[in-house]
Image: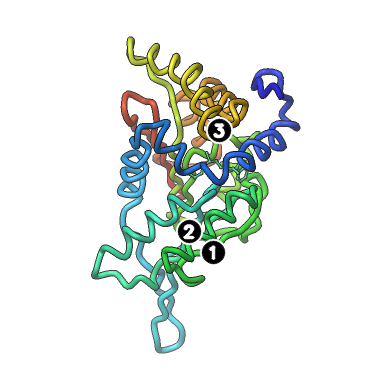
Amino acid sequence: ANFGYKKVDINQKQSMVNQVFHSVADKYDLMNDILSLGIHRCWKEEFVNDLGVLRPTKIQEKDQVIEQPARVLDVAGGTGDIAFRILDKHKSRSSLNSKNLKVTVLDINESMLEVGKRRALEKSFSNNDIDFVCGNAEILPFEDNTFDAYTIAYGIRNVPRIEKALSEAHRVLKKGGRLMILEFSKVEQFPVSEIYKQYNMNILPLVGKYVVGDADSYQYLAESIDKFHDQQTLLRLIEEAGFKFASYKNLSFGISAIHTGFKI
Ligand code: SAM
């Protein structure tokens, strides 16, 4: 199959993306480590650090105050990597009760979610900590004003209609809620830009071929990174979706970037 990004119609993109992640699911986490030389762990760590502490919502009911757990929606959450990091960080802050945070992982791909569910069991997380929902970022199966934070890591470039995903993010966030996007971005600085481009186009499919036995999927990943928006364009889309105080920061020369915005 030729996963040439340019030739793919927007309506076909989702089924192609689903095929890619179905194919790589079992080796997805290992491949991330190999291909980024472990650096994706640092980027994810920084992403989760930037999310900061999420506090439970206090609701006054008659004469008592009830605490509802802070809720995070991790979209395109796949194998649960970001969700586990958020939960681990929360638990490590000893003053915070671990029951005060719940992460919902949403992904369109059952194969990725299966790996995530298995890992959640291994890590002894319960349904009170985490739940897994199969769904589409473009049509979220949640009510308006449900979540305190919406995270999406290396997911948004795979969604065919980014504007729809961002407007859904805005809808399901509570007032004051925060959008956080971690995604590959653009490197401007020569010669890092050239080395990075060559690496993506040549090394990535080669390693994909020998480790996963699927060069096409990694060819798609490389092309999708190359074709994705630059920092400023994604920032503009976030603002157009209604988010305020939107900003971004580069990680490792812009190989990745963290974008954020708030629903006010
Ligand atoms: N967030 C995880 C991480 O950082 O390791 C997984 C990222 S993985 C590169 C991209 C994920 O996006 C895949 O699991 C894929 O199934 C999911 N995805 C693609 N299109 C989607 C959509 N329209 N809605 C929800 N998830 C989608």
Kind of residue at badge 2: Arg
Q: Residue at x 49, y 30 (%)?
A: 234
**At which x and y percent is residue 8?**
71, 24
Q: As rendered, which of 98 and 201 lies closer to the eye?
A: 201
Mark 2 or mark 3, which has the lower sequence index?
A: 2
Kindly indicate the quadrant of the structure image that contains residue 41. Answer: top left
Q: Is residue 104 left or right of residue 97?
A: right
Q: Give ligand 1's quarter of the image.
A: top right
Whether 10 is drawn above or below 178: the answer is above
Which labelled disc corresponds to residue 131? 1
Report the Cα–Cα distance between label 3 and label 1: 24 Å
Q: Which residue has dot 2 on it?
A: 119
* Quarter of the image that includes the N terminus: top right
Kind of residue at badge 3: Arg
**At which x and y percent is residue 103?**
47, 61
Q: Which residue has dot 3 on it?
A: 157
Q: Is residue 120 left or right of residue 42?
A: right
- Is the CB–ligand 1 distance for label 3 below 8 Å? no
Q: Mark 1 Cα within 10 Å, few/some/many (few <14, many 20+)?
A: some
Report the Cα–Cα distance between label 2 and label 3: 25 Å
**SS of the residue under disc 2:** helix
How is the rendered protein coloured? rainbow
Whether 167 is drawn above or below 104: the answer is above
**SS of the residue under disc 1:** strand
Q: Is residue 23 left or right of residue 191?
A: right
Kindly indicate the quadrant of the structure image that contains residue 93. Answer: bottom left
